[in-house]
Image (cartoon, grey):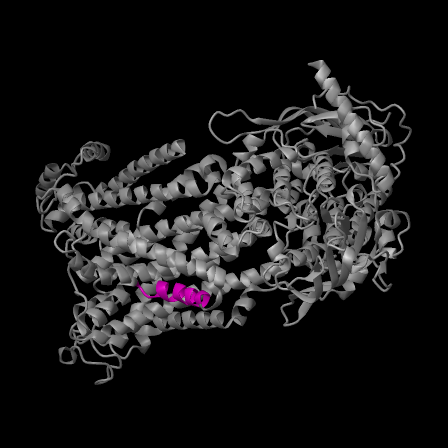
Amino acid sequence: MTTPTTQALATARRRDRPSVFRAVLRNPLGAASLIVIALIVLISVLAPLIAPYDPAYVDITAANVPPGADGHLLGADASGRDVLSRLLVAGQLTLSGAAVTVVISVLLGVIVGLVSGYFGKTFDLVAGWISDLVLVLPSKIVLVALFAVIGPNTLVTMAVLGVMVAPQFYRLVRNLVMGVKNELYVDAARVSGLSDAAIIGKHVLFAVRAPIIIQAAFVAGIAVVIQAGLEFIGLGDPNTPTWGGMLQDAFLAMYTAPTMLLWPGLAIGLFVAACVLLGNAVRDALEGTDAALNVSAAPSTSTTAVRTVQKPVVIDDPADEDVLLRVDDLSVGYPDGDGGVKRVVESVSFSIRPGEVLGVVGESGSGKSQTAFAILGLLPSNGRVTGGRILFEGRELDPLTGARRLRGTRVAYIPQEPMSNLDPAYRIGAQLMEPLVVVSRLSRAAARERALSLLERVGIADPKRVFDSYPHEISGGMAQRVLIAGAIAGEPDLIIADEPTTALDVTVQAEILDILRDLQRERGMAMMLVTHNFGVVADLCDRVVVMQTGRVVEAGSVEAIFEAPQHPYTAMLLGSILDGGPARPDYEDDEHVSAPAEKEVAL
Amino acid sequence: MTAPLLEVRDLRVAYPRKGFRRPPVEILHGVSLDVRPGETVGLVGESGSGKTTLGRAILGLAPVTGGAIRFDSADITSVDRSDRRRLARDIQVVFQDPYGSLNPALRIEDILAEPLRVQGVGREAARARVRELLGQVGLPEDAGGRLPREFSGGQRQRVAIARALALQPKLIVCDEPVSALDLSTQARVLDLFIEIQERTGVAMLFVSHDLAVVRHVSHRVAVMYRGDIVEFGRGAVVTADPDHAYTRRLLMAAPVPNPAEQQARRAERRAMLEAEAQARAEAV
Amino acid sequence: MLIFLLRRLIAGAVLVVAISFVAFALMYAGGVDIARSILGPEATQEQAQAKAAELGLDQPLLVQYGSWFTHMITGDFGRSWFTAESVSDAVVSRLGVTLSIVVVSLIAVAVISVLLGVVAAIRRGWVDKVVQVLSVVGVALPNFWVALVLVLTLAIAVPLFPATGFVQPRESVSGWLLSITLPVIAITIGGIAGAAQQIRGSVLDVSRQDFVRTLRSRGLPERRVITNHILRNSLGPAMTVLSLQFIAMIGGSVVIEKVFAIPGLGMLALNATLRGDIPIVMAVVMTMAVVVVIVNLLIDLVNGWASPKVRVQ
């Protein structure tokens, strides 16, 4: 039993499941906000014990006394009540109101969202409609209106606010659950016979709990602000001190004692800011741990034991003058999170002659796509060319921008995934015409004509219809043809195609390969064809470059590579090909197999 | 003739469409096939052929609107949740996506123990069985304590295979299990499938879009096109010298990894397409 | 596109009717008790019954609703229970005041938050930091507190703007502008805080999509890629964000109008609710609901134009 896996595992570092809580604490803002919230809650709970005065104690002689005077640290209000004491005690009703809102909105929203997301259909329709209805209403107005019915009852009012906020949790949970429901590991659990409740409890809830916590933090903050607003306009509980109520007092005394505005405002601001920052910290921590959970720890090491100890085998490298594109000792790297640079392409060299098709073959992690992007100057924002040169027609390109000025007119790109590479907001025709008008400076009429003829050239049966369609209205195979049309529209000399047929069905792939070959011959275009499929290489390419973990291990003519591979990695790859291999020996003694009559199906 | 383990007869599957009173979309138009004990039947087709839907229907994950599925002489076309749990002991699944088929937040031993715990296996017994399974698929014993992200795609597929084997099923439905893997890993995982079948006698329904993959691993092969099975016979024959025009087209379309041979095949394919076009023009 | 518009219109109308029923049921559920609370705690049972009959509160809820609804269709919202003025007159005279402030604020929020969000997403740098800080501070400080601070500094300490009051635009445009400046600033800060961060997020998401890279590969200048493609695709999510902000602003009017003593819908609702003048409260709720539905409809239209996929759903 082959166990090449042990090798990879031995080198992988053992990592415990990253705790979201710990990640939050490590974030300075996250830790600070947790501490602030905990302090405020603690102080509010202990307020009656630690407040210097009874918050309701009226002392006319101290009316509007400024802060610092007479044993009133923060001053006294118009009735002579100590501001500090009132501030401390006010936290109680404010925080309990917020708590009521959070609890009700979470319970209502999460439960309805779970049921809606998991079971769908009518329940989902009705719940969604009710949720939309609630969201349309401005919550403050509804609470003001209901005051006429409820009266100055803070906790009931905050409960109603909870109902009004619940749709936020409902939508969040419902969408998350619908996403998780379609995950394959849920299907696997269903096949194992896990009950719906168990699936929800084990798989679904887990994916959902952190976003709920984040939202709950924000809701707590919003609840405090809304409650303060209601109290400010006079709808609060008149007998209990609240931060909003204190602001109302401050408002009435604004001309005589303006500093009274400061303290309740700061209390509210501090608490709400802490809630928001805590929510942000949890979200950042979640993204960090999510990334860690999903990134595989065996990135560019293929699971083969064959290492590049042998020198690369390169045959037949032409001299500078003949060459259209030359890549010389190119290296590409990304920041690795610890301050260093992780190289995904290492000292890669190859060249392409005019009109030649070069296949760049490798498995995942070989760096073949990264090389293509580096040449085009389309690396993602944190990727860099860290060494080497790229020369087009003998002239060196700027390593930061690659072939930027040549894009569209001399060098073109065909991507892998057809659907996600078309702008969903524009019709196909408009997308084809735009570069022709803007870059190639054609008139609109000429561009339109060229676009239509291109669509026909790539084998689309009804060019006019596709021209007028949006990307979501055409199939994957058609979309890839459109992308090819877009690439050749500017009459480039070099096409860089990144796995152009991998996402397509095999019959469609054959048609696309035919088109690519015909176009290439007809226009004398050179092509850099990135692929992992040796059949595609055999079909289209003149020369081949084999890459493994960022390096070139072999290069040569296509006949030489297939007939006599020199490097063990190339030989191993070719040996893994299944095409033309033996079939399974027959089942028992299978000469006569009962088969249903063949169907006559129109193709 | 050995009696079939799984028998699908005239199966129809249709998905409801959004909106009021719109007729459902039929994906399978009455397909029939069978799988014998210890046999691998390959199911090959392109996108829209319904091959994945057929696999899912057998697993109880697709809405059956006609026909029947029989397993071990019992009708399993529509089973409720408790029956499904019992069936789970006999029919299991390996999915395509090694990154989506394992819950990224659970450890390997929890993932592998899940089907066991559902059946009521005790914790210690489950743990022992997990160790055994890891050995069967060539993963080291300490893999149990790790998370999926610490493994490569090929290794994760081994975990998925181990999970499928946990309850010693009689049939495993494999839905494109090697399509997302590198070339070198594909061959090895396929050989693992074959080895497990030879050792445990489990039957497999192996769904794939790749004729070569299906040829390597199957005894018999069924070819699907737009919701119908157009050909079903011995693997060696169907994948090398098929009868049906669609299968021939499928075969011709796959490029051969040899420049000279591919040139020949290209010519053959062109000729075949022209002949078809001729025949169509004449039929009009 | 036309069918899309029609569908949204009908959906909006249904929504408004549903809201009216729910609101009505909640407010008038008390029945005879409402009459008693109007009269005060010393009222006798007969007095309460008589008052209830006078106001129609002794009828079954559905009958009351039906009567209210048929009147509402013709624009008749009845009369105040306390001042005998026509409710629709009261509402109409205040609607323009509130709308002028909220609409100006919405435009300010839209322009500034889109600018900030887009620059933060594309240029990063210090604008990015500003947006992130603002998104915390602007939410944490209640907008009425900011309003109070503005009044203290820009109206009392340095008398640049009026501390209270509203000047009708037809009386004096400059007076109107001065009277709404401080309220608009107060509302806008909170609105930008909420919107800029989210717009930044959605612009970032769009700019990371595959088709953006392919567009660049065609040789299109970066500026064009940003304006014609990235922004166009971010429009939908941005509109959604702004519509939520609008709803919050309409709700916030009740507090802001109190600070600046502006005779708008918010003050009308507040005074009515303190008295228990339910017909006026109902009318204000309905008016605001209709305004929000109309604004959402307009936003849906923009969405439908920007994102063709949405039209099909």
At 66% from the left edge and 44% from the top edge, which residue is drawn?
A188
Asked if one can make out residue A97 in the rendered structure from this viewpoint, the answer is: no
What quarter of the picture does the C terminus of chain A occupy?
A: top right
Q: Is residue A597 above or below residue C184?
A: above
Residue B15: image quadrant is top right
Image coordinates of residue A333 in percent, x first then y, are 67, 65
Q: Nearer the viewer, residue A326 or B232?
A: A326
Determine the residue positioned at 79% across, 46% down: A541
Q: Please tell me whether residue C149 is drawn above or below residue A316 in the rendered image.
A: below
Residue C132 is inside the magenta segment: yes
Residue A322 visible to the viewer: yes
Q: Specify the segment rendered in magenta.
A: C127-142
Find out whether residue A18 is within the magenta segment: no
Picture quadrant of residue B52 = top right
Q: Is residue C225 left or right of residue A602?
A: left
Residue A52 in percent (x, y) is at 27, 80
Percent x, y of residue C72 = 20, 35
How many labels, in total?
A: 0
Q: Is residue B145 above or below residue A182?
A: below
Overall secondary structure of the magenta section: helix
Question: Is residue A487 or residue B99 the one in the foreground?
Answer: A487
Residue A23 left/right relative to B29:
left
Residue positioned 39% across, 49% down in the render: C239
